[in-house]
Image (spheres, rainbow, N blue to C red):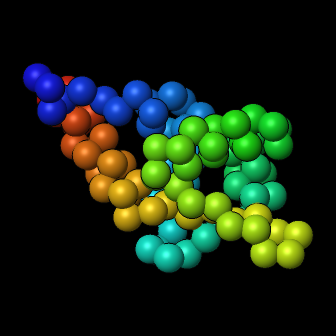
């Protein structure tokens, strides 16, 4: 049952929504902070807090260029999200 455990970092609803949104991007593509905030309907503070958790886990990378901050999934983040989806599918049977 160990491989059927859901990743607690991803499983938090807001972070799961972030992962789903960022996973829709092609590898290497980014989403701007304001657009991600708009899509997820989050406050700036809430978005920053959850992005930091995902970044600390190595799942997301953020980059500031001028006044624009962007976010993207890392390869590790894509792999973790794929594993999460497989575990969820297995649990749901």
Q: Is residue 76 visible?
A: yes
Q: Is residue 33 left or right of residue 86?
A: right
- 50 relative to 58, above or below: above
Q: Residue at x 45, y 33 (%)?
A: 9
Where in the figure is residue 46, as x and y percent of width and height? Answer: 75, 35
Q: Is residue 44 left or right of residue 7?
A: right
Q: Which residue of the protein is positioned furthest toward the top in this rendering?
A: 1
Q: Is residue 88 left or right of residue 28?
A: left
Q: Is residue 22 visible?
A: no
Q: Is residue 51 left or right of residue 56?
A: right
Q: Residue at x 46, y 52 (%)?
A: 59
Q: Depth check: 85 or 65 in front?
A: 65
> Which quadrant is home to the C terminus?
top left
Residue 86 occupies which quadrant of the picture?
A: top left
Where in the figure is residue 63, as x and y percent of width and height? Answer: 68, 67
Q: Which residue of the protein is positioned furthest toward the left in this rendering?
A: 1
Q: Residue at x 57, y 38 (%)?
A: 53
- 31 relative to 81, above or below: below
Where in the figure is residue 7, as x and y percent of width and height? Answer: 35, 33
> Which quadrant is home to the N terminus?
top left
Q: Residue at x 75, y 58 (%)?
A: 33
Q: Depth check: 26 or 2 in front?
A: 2
Q: Depth check: 9 or 15 in front?
A: 9
Q: Which residue of the protein is positioned furthest toward the front in this rendering?
A: 56
Where in the figure is residue 6, as x and y percent of width and height? Answer: 31, 29
Number of numbered discs overlaid on the protein picture: 0
């Amino acid at each position: 049952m160990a491989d059927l455990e859901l990743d607690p970092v991803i499983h938090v609803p807001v972070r799961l929504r972030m992962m789903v949104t960022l996973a829709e991007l092609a590898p290497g593509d980014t989403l701007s902070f304001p657009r991600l905030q708009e899509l997820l309907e989050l406050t700036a503070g809430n978005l920053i807090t959850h992005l930091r958790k995902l970044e600390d886990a190595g799942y997301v990378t953020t980059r500031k260029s001028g006044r624009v901050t962007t976010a993207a999934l890392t390869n590790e983040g894509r792999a973790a999200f794929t594993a999460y989806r497989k575990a969820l599918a297995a649990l749901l049977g």
